[in-house]
């Protein structure tokens, strides 16, 4: 079932539109040129996940590209999936600890197979849900929980089975002043987005 709690605060629509445009153009170029960037997994036979209406409820694949600590692309056979973790919201590109969150995601996933459970889709047809990898010790690791435990994201308020653990993990990192909690007053991504969006509106 999709999350029943408050909807995740939207990412910057202008940034998303720009990124989506890049994906679309990249996919069209791949079709025309029959090639792709080294790590993109785009080729003439697949399309960006944002252009699809349906997808399986469970996915497996390896990390192809990251857009942030909490959203990434995974190639599966001939299809590219754009996956967004629920339960965590990591800093935006122009915020402190953005790169640390991305690096942590990449280091955690490595070349390991990522297991994804798709719960819902957003308005851009991105897949939203939970994701896990099996670490070097053979432990099944929840990617969102690892980010929260390192202080590299906020629990974003979604209510779902087990969401209390996400909230508690964030509060533990906050109490220990880990990661972004080492700052006096860190700004949540959704507030940062609103301020940026409001500023852009004033400039128009």
Image (spheres, rainbow, N blue to C red):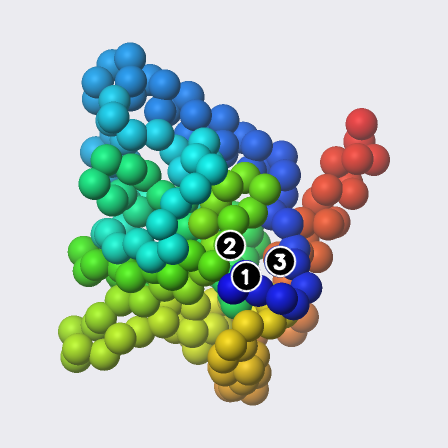
Mark 1 Cα within 10 Å, few/some/many (few <14, many 20+)?
few
SS of the residue under disc 3: loop
Is disc 3 in contact with disc 2, using a CB cutoff of under 8 Å? no
Sequence-first tag of 3 and 2: 3
Q: Residue at x 42, y 74 (%)?
A: 145
Q: Position of residue 64 (x, y in %)?
A: 28, 45
As rendered, which of 71 and 80 lies closer to the eye? 80
As rendered, which of 106 and 122 lies closer to the eye? 122
Mark 1 to mark 3: distance in Å?
12 Å
Q: Residue at x 41, y 50 (%)?
A: 83
> Image quadrant for the C terminus?
top right
Sequence-first tag of 1 and 3: 1
Is disc 1 in contact with disc 3, using a CB cutoff of under 8 Å? no
Q: Residue at x 65, y 67 (%)?
A: 5
SS of the residue under disc 1: loop
Sequence-first tag of 2 and 1: 1
From the image, tell me which residue sits under label 2.
120
Q: Indicate whether 184 appears above or below 121.
A: below
From the image, tell me which residue sits under label 1.
2
Q: Is residue 190 visible?
A: yes
Q: Indicate whether 8 appears above or below 174.
A: above
Q: Is residue 142 left or right of residue 135?
A: right
1 vs 3, front mark? 1
Mark 2 Cα within 10 Å, few/some/many (few <14, many 20+)?
some
Q: Position of residue 85 (x, y in %)?
A: 46, 59
Is disc 2 in contact with disc 1, using a CB cutoff of under 8 Å? yes
Mark 2 to mark 1: distance in Å?
5 Å
Q: Position of residue 187 (x, y in %)?
A: 66, 63
From the image, tell me which residue sits under label 3.
8
Q: Residue at x 32, y 67 (%)?
A: 132
Q: Quadrant of residue 16?
A: top right
């Amino acid at each position: 079932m999709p999350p029943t709690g408050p909807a995740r605060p939207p990412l910057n629509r202008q940034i998303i539109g720009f990124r989506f445009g890049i994906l679309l153009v990249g996919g069209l170029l791949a079709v025309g040129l029959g090639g792709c960037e080294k790590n993109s997994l785009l080729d003439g036979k697949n399309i960006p996940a944002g252009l699809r209406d349906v997808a399986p409820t469970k996915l497996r694949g390896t990390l192809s590209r990251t857009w942030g600590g909490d959203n990434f692309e995974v190639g599966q056979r001939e299809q590219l999936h754009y996956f967004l973790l629920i339960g965590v919201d990591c800093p935006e590109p122009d915020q402190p600890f953005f790169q640390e969150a991305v690096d942590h995601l990449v280091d955690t996933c490595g070349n390991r197979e990522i297991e994804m459970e798709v719960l819902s889709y957003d308005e851009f047809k991105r897949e939203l849900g939970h994701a896990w990898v099996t670490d070097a010790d053979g432990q099944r690791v929840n990617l969102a929980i690892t980010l929260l435990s390192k202080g590299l994201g906020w629990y974003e308020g979604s209510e779902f089975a087990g969401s209390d653990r996400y909230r508690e993990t964030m509060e533990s990192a906050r109490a220990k002043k880990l990661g972004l909690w080492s700052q006096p007053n860190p700004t949540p991504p959704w507030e940062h987005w609103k301020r940026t969006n409001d500023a852009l509106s004033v400039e128009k």
